[in-house]
Each structure stands twice: as structure tokens, then as C-alpha cells.
Image: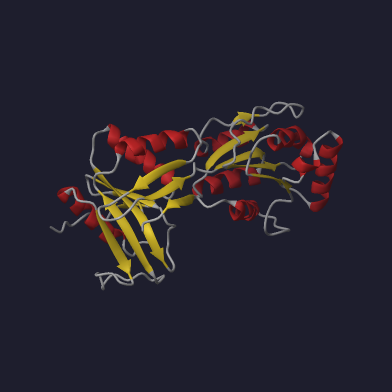
Amino acid sequence: MRITLPDQVSYVEHASDIIAFATVLIEQERSFALITSIAIEGGAARELGSLAIVDDQGEMTGYLSNGCIDQDIRVHAQNTLVSQKPTVVRYGDGSRFADLKLPCGGALSVLINPKPDTDAIVAAHNKLLARTPAVIDFMIENLSNISFAYRPKFRLVLAGRGAVFRAMAEIGKSSGFQVFGLSPDLGDLASITALTDIPPIHLTTPSQAPSLSMLDENAAFVTLFHDHDWEPELLRAALATHAHFIGSLGSVRTHEARRAYLSQTGVSQAHLARLIGPIGLVSSLREAPLISISAMAEIVDTLPRGIQILDEFN
């Protein structure tokens, strides 16, 4: 039975958001189909292991293409919710759906499961909340398991003030990062409060850094000051963490002076080697949004793959 669905797709990106939404549906005792990309040949809009959900109202959260096949995936998912039979659908080369083309070429296979392992989903959600990778196994009749490890959402921790501080918080949020903010300026803190995952931290003295416990291996820390007296203790604290990326705004001369001062005050060369600066892939920019985009691009360039394949179908 074919079902006509309303034109409703929420383009949610990160797997942790899909898993969190699935957990809400489980708590509400609502049915849903979990959709997973399990095979990619050639180009693809999303990476292997990407997730989406079609719920009992026919709404799709997440996506598997850039709009070219998502509506068809929704129809298949709604049909599986009626039949309660998992299925694998192939698009592109070798597909039985000749009228549905993948502009990027190649082929994509998706697993649509109307009876996902809810215990595994809840367990994965709890692991991601605890900032640890979560593994989910996927299986279908006549095929062996395929497992993916999902990373927690990446954090962007900004310490600074002024236009670049505000612009980078906005760009980080729109890029899907968890945003944290620290600033001595109450106006700047107020301007980013709606963008942050916890209330921003008011810096009251340059001589002591607050706890930076939010920094882990899935986090970036960036200082965005023109008055660089605020930086040393913050950078010292950040360099003592496992933050994935640590960087600072400023000129080459400023960065050399920053490193020299930190070295004189006891920061090891091994720690200093982790400090990136001046941050940004494009030099000599003067507009806050462009400086922020340049800095974000450098951070993104260092990011590890978001989804790890642990086992593939035979």
C-alpha cells in the first residue's frame, strides 16, 4: 500500500539529535521507523551511518540525501510502519526505482526498520549525554550485522568579547555545534545566551580561570580578545584538558608574544605545540562574520570523522 505524505522533512544533521528525538518518541510510546544509510557507492550527500526517523505522523526528522530521494524514503518508511517489516531500499545504480536519480552518481542503500531496538537507542542516548561514543548495531534478515559508533556533538567554547565573539557564537550554533561562552562583558554574554547550551560564564578577573570542565576530546576552545591580558590563565587551563582544538585570535606577532609568555610562566613545549594561532584559514580579514567563518573553517578542517564503521554487511 502506497501512502501519500505531507511535504514535511526536518533537516536535522547530527546523529545525537536523531537519537535524542527517538528517545522522546520511545518515552511517549509512539511508533517510528529508524532509517540508516548502510551502503554508499560513489558520491553521497551524507556519510555512511547517517540516521533519520519517520514517526507515526509521517514526519521525517533527519535526511539521507540532499532532497532528491528523502520524500520517497518517507513513503517506504510509512509503509513499513503499516507492515512492521524492515526493508532495505537501494537508490542509484542497480536500483529498481529507475525514475529516482542520484545527481551525485553511484548508489545508496538504506535500512528502514519499523521495529528498532529501543533499549539500544536509549542506551546510546545516555552514552552521548555522558560525552562518550555510542555504538548501535543494525541488522536485517539474510544479512549480517553492521555497527556504527556515533560521536557526541562537537562543542565550541568561546572566551572573548566584541563583534567576533558574538559572530562566532552565531555561526557555531548554526553549524550544529554546542556553544559555550565566557566573557568579561555582560552585554556580550546577554547577546549569546539564546545560542548557548548552558548559561554563559562571566569572567571577573584575568588572574584566575574558571573551570573548563566542558572541554573534552570533542571540543574546541578559542580565545577572541583584543585585550590579551585575559588569555594566559584561560589558555593555561585549556591546555591542561583533552580539548581537540585550542586556538587564539590575533596577529602573528601577538601569537609569538603569547607563546613566549606562556613558556616563561611554566607551560611546557608539548602543551604549547597544541596552541594554534593566529586562528583562521584566511589572513588579514577585518569583518567579524568573515573572521569567524575563517576560524570555524580551520576548526572544521581538524574534526575527526563523525561516524565510525565498526562492522559491515557480508
Asked if 222 appears above or below 296 in the picture, the reply is above
Q: What residue is at 36 percent from the left and 35 percent from the top? A: 122
For residue 64, say whether it is visible. Answer: no
Residue 56 sits in quarter: top left
Identify which residue, 276 or 124, lies in the foreground. Answer: 124
Image coordinates of residue 89 in percent, x first then y, are 27, 61
Identify which residue, 313 or 276, lies in the foreground. Answer: 313
**Quadrant including the C terminus:** bottom left
Horizontally, is 298 left or right of 17 in the view? right
**Quadrant including the N terminus:** bottom left
Specify the farthest residue to the right: 264
Horizontally, is 227 left or right of 142 in the view? right
Identify which residue, 4 or 228, lies in the foreground. Answer: 4
| Display coloring | secondary structure
Q: What residue is at 40 percent from the left and 63 percent from the top? A: 40
For residue 198, say whether it is visible. Answer: yes
Image coordinates of residue 85 in percent, x first then y, are 19, 51
Image coordinates of residue 139 in percent, x first then y, are 31, 50
Horizontally, is 124 left or right of 154 in the view? left
Image coordinates of residue 62 in percent, x first then y, are 36, 51
Q: What residue is at 44 percent from the left and 67 percent from the top? A: 43
Q: What residue is at 23 percent from the left and 41 percent from the top? A: 31
Please tell me how many numbered marks the rendered image carries. Answer: 0
Asked if 158 appears above or below 91 in the picture, the reply is above
Horizontally, is 245 left or right of 15 in the view? right
Asked if 238 appears above or below 103 in the picture, the reply is above
